[in-house]
Amino acid sequence: MASRLYDHVLTVCRDHGFMPGTIRHARNPNFIHGLVLAGLGIHLNEAPAQKLPAGLVWRPIHGEPLAWVTSTVWSSSQHSPVLADLTEAVHEGLTACGHEPCA
């Protein structure tokens, strides 16, 4: 779904001495939690919005955490006030959630 982000995560892991032996792609939190609880994985993610199941602990990554770059793209011939409003709303929403704008 996000191949550049996927490659970035693996590169950062490798550069810091961690290379997973197996990679499982999962979106279902219950499945992911089950893998972690069974000792079969780790889960890289932002701080959980809800309490984690018993036996799971979230810890922040110290140092240089992974960065996720979000952008919007459209044809210059399609620019409109609606697109400008959408871009501003996305920027405000991401900023409100703690994302930092790129220079």
Image: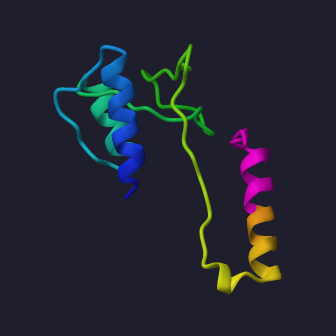
- Point out residue 92 in the picture as x, y percentages from the top left corner: 80, 54
Colour scheme of this structure image? rainbow
Q: Nearer the viewer, residue 46 or 11?
A: 11
Which residues fall within the magenta stretch? 90-103
The correct choice, above or below, for 103 with respect to 20 in the image is: below
Residue at 16% of width from left, 27% of height from top?
Answer: 21
- Point out residue 23 in the picture as x, y percentages from the top left corner: 22, 37
The correct choice, above or below, for 46 with respect to 61 in the image is: below
65 left or right, relative to 40: right
- Point out residue 45 in the picture as x, y percentages from the top left corner: 49, 35
- Indicate whether residue 91 is drawn in magenta: yes
Q: Nearer the viewer, residue 57 or 71?
A: 71
Q: Is residue 18 in view? A: yes
Q: Nearer the viewer, residue 40 or 72?
A: 72
Q: Is residue 28 in view? A: no
Which residue, as the protein is rendered here, is positioned at the far front? Answer: 76
